[in-house]
Amino acid sequence: MVGKTIKREVICMAKEKLTTNRILLRLGIVSIVGIIIWNGLGYITDFLLGDTIGRIHRLLIALITTILTVALLEVARRIDKLSWKQLGVKSVRTNFCLFSLGFFLWLIPAAIGVIICITFGWVEITLHSNWDVLIVSLLLLIITVFFMEALPEELMFRGYMYRYLHILFPHWATVLLQASLFTLFAYFVGALYSVEQIQFIPGFALILGYIRSVSGNVWTSIGFHVAIMTAFQILSPLHEHVDVSGMFALKFFAFILLPSAIGAIALGFIYPNHKWSKKASMPSL
């Protein structure tokens, strides 16, 4: 009787270890294919367009990036017999509402931060474009950011990878680990090209992981991602719309610190029953 019990426990441990290995294998495969997609599109774009790439070209590349990433995750999802709901994607209405929540969790505190920075003389912003030109450029940039980085990156890291990491680890550890994987991914696709990026990306991944964890939906982090990266990019000299004096204060205080702090507090009130020690259930493969 004792021998049978020990044998049963050994078999259960072997199955658990095998399942863990399968999860790690899936995370590795999705990461590698994702790196190939991002780098491959970058190489093809440089070869075909070089320095002549325009806004429409960027939008097309963004659409291709999303299509390939969603296709990758769809294949992985079907192999694992997972639903999109299990990856943090729910109904269209819920997704839209939580996307808006994430977007405004960044926008409202950021707007307050910009007002504070200008009022105290930390920042000066000079507009070089007409408002109609700026608005059109802003709308096009929002769409490009959505398809180029926010949607594919969030589905991959705060969706698929978060789901599987959460099977092995509680929420708090999953947030840390997905941030590490995201930073490693950024390194291999060439996104850690400056000291500023090295300082920004790990913290950014932690913020996005926190938002996804507490809200329980990847679309909340997509909304936050779209908002902050659109603001970062519209102020870039490449767009030639504005000239900013005191860019560091604007980015750190108005764009990162206030939205992160206020957003975290707001989510805590909206989702007071979030359990950081909880793990996800193991799917049957």
Image (cartoon, rainbow, N blue to C red):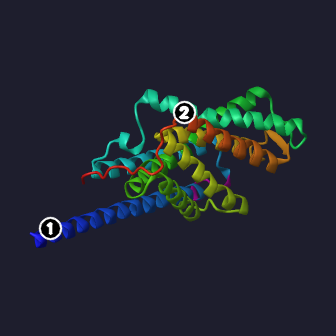
Residue 5 shows which numbered tag?
A: 1
Looking at this view, is 13 or 151 the one in front? 13
Q: Is residue 257 above or below residue 181?
A: above
Q: Secondary structure at mark 2?
A: helix
Q: Residue furthest bottom?
A: 3
| Quadrant location, the N terminus | bottom left
The mark nearer the N terminus, 1 or 2, is 1
Q: Is residue 167 left or right of residue 222?
A: left
Q: Is residue 249 visible?
A: yes
Quarter of the image where one finds residue 83? top left
Range shown magenta = 47-51
What is the C-alpha distance between the residues marked 1 and 2?
46 Å
Compared to residue 267, the image places residue 27 above or below, namely below
Q: Mark 1 belongs to which amino acid?
A: Thr
Counting from the top left corner in percent of width and height, residue 95 is at 47, 32
Determine the residue positioned at 61% across, 53% down.
49
Q: Farthest left residue? A: 1
Label 2, on which residue?
270
Q: Is residue 74 left or right of residue 194?
A: left
Q: How far across and how far down the image is residue 196, in percent?
A: 72, 58
Q: Main secondary structure of the magenta part?
A: helix
How busy is the neighbourhood of tag 1: few (under 14 within 10 Å), some, or many (20 plus)? few
Q: Does residue 137 appear anywhere in the picture?
A: no
Q: Is residue 15 above or below residue 85?
A: below
- Closer to us: 285 or 273: 273
